[in-house]
Amino acid sequence: GAMAPGKKITARIKRTLPVRGPQAPTLSELMRWYCLNTNTHGCRRIVVSRGRLRRFIWILLTLSAVGLILWQCAELLLNYYSASVSVTVQFQKLPFPAVTICNINPYKYSSMKDYLSELDKETKKALETFYGFSEGKSKVRRSVDEWNSTGSEFFKQIPLLKLEDFSRMAIDLHSGQKRKIEGSVFHKDSSIVNSGDSNDIIGFQLCDANNSSECALYTFSSGVNAIQEWYKLHYMNIMAQIPLETKEKSSYSADDLLLTCFFDGLSCDKRHFTRFHHPLHGNCYTFNSGENGTILSTSTGGSEYGLQVVLYIDEADYNPFLVTSTGAKIIVHDQNEYPFIEDIGTEIETAAATSIGMHFTRSRKLSKPYSDCTETGADIPVENLYNKSYSLQICLHSCFQKAMVDSCGCAQYAQPLPAGAEYCNYKKYPNWMYCYYRLHEKFVKEQLGCQQICKDACSFKEWALTTSIAQWPSTVSEDWMLRVLSWDKGQKLNKKLNKTDLANLMVFYKDLNERFISENPANTLVILLSNFGGQLGLWMSCSVVCVIEIVEVFFIDSLSIVMRRQWQKAKKWWNDRKRDRPGKPPQASDLERQGHENPVCIDEDLPTFNTALQLPLPQDSPLPRTPPPNYSTLRLETAFTEQLPDTLEVGQR
């Protein structure tokens, strides 16, 4: 089994002059050349190692190193857009926030009785029917206004119901008759533990005005909650039809609400407060709103240098069915933020001094691609209805209001009006209640898409509040203090104020340390490249040049070899197709020009004279003869008109 001479010469040439780069005929030759010449040691050891076991070990080690590099580099890329949080605390003069104060009772009951008389009568009837509660002879005045006739019809449509033993039978409050309940049942107090007494199940039924068979029954474990929810439903219907000017006059003025005011040790008055009307809380007043371009600040912490006010609550003029607590609601916010009293307001109780200490924190998050927050809200496809700086709360409320207008044709009373819309009321939109409850159910279950569209703001300010309460006024000072406050209020001396009508409020900075929480990129491009280099050097002793080499060999050179082989195959196929075209018989001259397969010839060795003598003659072809010489070609014919001089000399010699 000696190697043929041709193979020996070929092998020797390959060893001494290896084929380089993209000139390699096959991918295996290219990979061998790469392994022998690359800077990564593992690949070279695979080729030069002797023995299958050692080569297998080096293959396993090299592949493991490549896998570790890919894993670590992927982790580096995934963590590239991570952020580190830094907290900075500095002591400085701080701007005082806006403080919005509302009476829990939105409107004076004495001013709104005419509008609410029919509703109050129905509510008292429910209390008497279901609970045996009676005030004696009703003193509610019957108004000849149009509210009553439409209200009476509406109460017939949506009366309070009392369920019997969780069955589908219910007692109608308005008619006193039993009726069968159709449609879905939604229990609004599922989180509250039921007492087990089925007689406590009270609710109301809402039906689609366009399809009376589409109904939903809303039940409550607590009769208090049921009556309040039912009352608020009709209350919003009535309030939506009352002009804004009338409501503002029926609510509390600054003189009504504010008895005394001090800020930073100096006296202040109603001129430092800005009024705005809230649909659910009536007239509210904001201290330090910045409306005139001036924002107050404080240079000293402590309760003596903050805001101190005494509020007149006037409990006797409260609506007994709308609110069940007495006091005020306050919220601390930035001058550019909308005060969401109903969502995050803090309640202040009467006959007490409430101290609210504040810690100020500014926060800033990195926007995309580090986090999914928005800088100004301009990239959120929801119209801001509040004319204040963007916040997540504003976006959610605006999104729901827009869905309300689109689905129900009118706007919910508690939120600002979109352009061209009007508030819902049962006169023009008899179906709005059923529509609103169904829509709100979708909103809570995140089926409206508002929670997916709205994003957190990247920058925001926060005042962390610490509340403490003390009895006020004290027993020994109660008498003279109430008399002085009555005098300040303009009352007669013989009629002093009741302490349950008053609330003392102090809002102040506990310290002047501003905390600034910011996010900074944890990685930069330089750090990322350094980490890449460390991983490549640790596992493969590789550099950037090595990476470029890998790209060149495994992508560019390999692709060129594959493309070249495909081109050669296509070219051969095309030539074979042209030669084998039908309709053209092979000529004898073609046959003579074609080569013949001879088993004597060896591909790897060049033909020699001896092998040529051993070639068998082709069958079915004339015997090749050597043509006789053409002697006329032996005559020399000069190609020149004159004989050259040097040839003459040669001829003479």
Image (tube, helix red, strand yellow):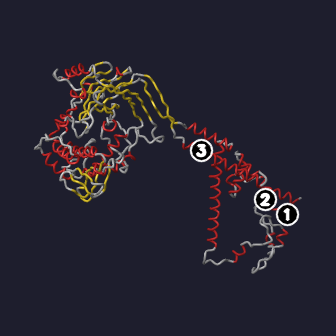
Q: Secondary structure at mark 3?
A: helix
Report how far apart the C-alphas of labels 1 and 3 lie in the structure.
Answer: 52 Å
Give yes or no for contact between labels 1 and 2 (Cβ–Cβ under 8 Å).
no
Residue 396 as seen in the image, left or right of residue 269: right
Mark nearest the camera among 3 and 2 is 3
Amino acid type at circle 2 is Thr
Rendered residue at 64%/39% (across/down): 534
Does residue 418 appear anywhere in the picture? no
List x then y, in percent, for residue 627.
79, 75
Per the image, the residue denoted by label 2 is 10
Q: Residues within 10 Å of mark 2 (few under 14, many from 20)?
A: few
Amino acid type at circle 1 is Ala
Residue 378 as seen in the image, left or right of residue 276: right
Mark nearest the camera among 1 and 3 is 3
Per the image, the residue denoted by label 3 is 73
Q: Secondary structure at mark 2?
A: helix
Rendered image quadrant of residue 586 = bottom right
List x then y, in percent, for residue 123.
20, 45
Q: Which numbered circle lies on residue 647?
A: none
Residue 610 as seen in the image, left or right of residue 474: right
Per the image, the residue denoted by label 1 is 2
- Residue placed furthest toward the left: 144
Q: Earlier in the sequence, mark 1 or mark 2?
A: 1
Question: In the rendered view, would you say 329 is above or below 427?
Answer: above
